[in-house]
Amino acid sequence: MTTQTESLEKDMYKTFWYADWSFPIFVALLSAGIFAGTHMYYVYKIGAFNDVAIVAMLEAGIQGAGYGAAAAFGASFLFARVLEGALVGILDIGGSLQTGIGIGVPAILLASGITAPVENFILSLITGALLGALVGYSILAIRKLTVGQSNSTFGADIMMGAGNASGRFLGPLIVISAASASIPIGIGSTIGAAIFYIWKKPVAGGAILGAMIFGAIFPISLE
Amino acid sequence: MEMIEVAIKSIIIGALVGIGVGAGAARMFHAPKAQGMGAFRTLGELNACAGDAASHFSFGLGFFFNAWASSVGAGAFTQDVDHRIIPNWAAAVLMRKGRRPEDTLHDPKKMAISGGIIGILVVSFLNLTASAIPESLQAIAVHVLVPAANLLINPVMPVIFWLAALDAGKRSGFWGTIFGGAAHLIMGNAVPGVVLGILIGKGVDDSGWNKVTKTLLISVIVLFILSAFFRGFDIQLLESMYITPPEWLLDFHKLLGLEVK
């Protein structure tokens, strides 16, 4: 019986939805969408799959302040995440695809004066898919060369812990910025955060919601 | 006309992203046997909702408002669309009838399909409604979310990763500090450097200085040298030491198309 389930499981990991060979296909799909998201941002100023602070680096480049920051930040994140993803079995799409391929690569292309892949929708899909497939295959190759040969997880657990810990900072940080924006918004944000905490919901969500409700009643200027 | 163009593009992008995220998230539950994609925190959060459709939905909703505000304020979806909203809502849809996570959330095929549908809806909604949000709410996004996100990226995240590296043992602490400091100097953010430092430190802790860890260290150093050069860090370094940069170095920068003022 045990041998039967084991062989069943072994077979499952060879089917399309679980196999190694299909992994680059999924990365290519996701990466095509993310790269096209950057195209949307470049053309319509909406739709980049990343956080405000990171998109701001690309925006700084578009405004003429140089693409160096976005390119270096994106490329180094991509490099680190591809290595890590192969070693631990989970590719972090935030660093590798959203920041690396979505921000870093466009910054490098735009800095070199190559605008077509970012300006044209179809080209952006193709570029994203090719880059994604490349990332997928690199991961499979690194996996074969490293995990197959050593038993180290390369500190994945430590980075997992640090990643989780930094996510938790967002809630309090939003309340602090809200309190610096205006008194009513600060009050709203504090109440929202407290209610969400009691409801066992993410504090960041409550802080934003509270700030938005009070900000709609007592507006502040965009300037 | 532009509305229709944005709508069509949004549907295509949403479907691609949703399928990828859905399948990748389900495959995470089978790592390391199958190579997954998503994030450790996504995996943890999906587990924390414990297969309860309402929890998955409301968790996604909290971040959806955040993503909406950020899209309105700065045109940036936030990483949470891929990390949290799509995987959690895709799971919520599959579990609405109280089915077990093993048959739903852990199944890449089902998650790819429901992820694709959620992706289309979320991306279209965010792209099409951004202009419909009143200015007072945009002001909130700019004045509240942007400074908070900036604080998180620098200095909160670098410090947390750095402390984690220091606590993880001598080697991680040492390499994390070296590369963290260098990364902040060269790239303006210490996180990539600290992460690479931890990778090297723990790699050596676990398996010693073998071919893999040596290659890792050398590629990291090459990466740093290259990004330093391309950002003109070498010239800035000389200038801040009151040394006039030699003509050949400036010419070399020019040769590669990166003129340094």
Image (spheres, coloured by chain):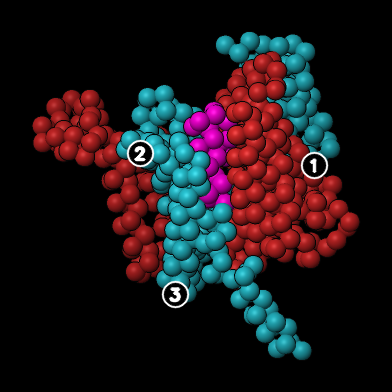
Residue highlighted by disc 1: B58
Q: Nearer the viewer, mark 2 or mark 3?
A: 2
Residue highlighted by disc 3: A149
Q: In this view, does A50 lie to the left or right of B231?
A: right
Which residue is rendered at x = 75% and y = 27% of the image?
Answer: A209
Q: Which comes before the other along the chain, label 2 or label 3?
A: 2
Which residue is rendered at x = 44% and y = 58% of the image?
Answer: A134
Residue span colored magenta: A30-52
Q: How many marks?
A: 3
Which residue is rendered at x = 62% and y = 45% of the image?
Answer: B12
Q: Give how far across and how far down residue B193 sits, in percent.
A: 41, 46
Among the 4 quarters of the image, the one containing residue B123: top right
Q: Give how far across and how far down residue A2 sits, in percent.
A: 74, 87
| Alpha carbon separation for disc pair 1 and 2 | 42 Å
The chain coloured red carries which letter? Answer: B
Give me the disc on residue B177: none
- For the residue marked with disc 2, what is the amino acid? Ile
Is any part of residue B100 visible from this angle? yes
Q: Is mark 3 on a helix, strand or loop?
A: loop
| Alpha carbon separation for disc pair 2 and 3 | 40 Å
- For the residue marked with disc 1, what is the amino acid? Ser
- For the residue marked with disc 3, what is the amino acid? Gln
Give me the disc on residue A114: 2
Q: In this view, does B43 lie to the left or right of A102?
A: right
Q: Give how far across and how far down residue B245 sits, in percent.
A: 15, 30
Of residues A114 and A9, the one nearer the viewer is: A114
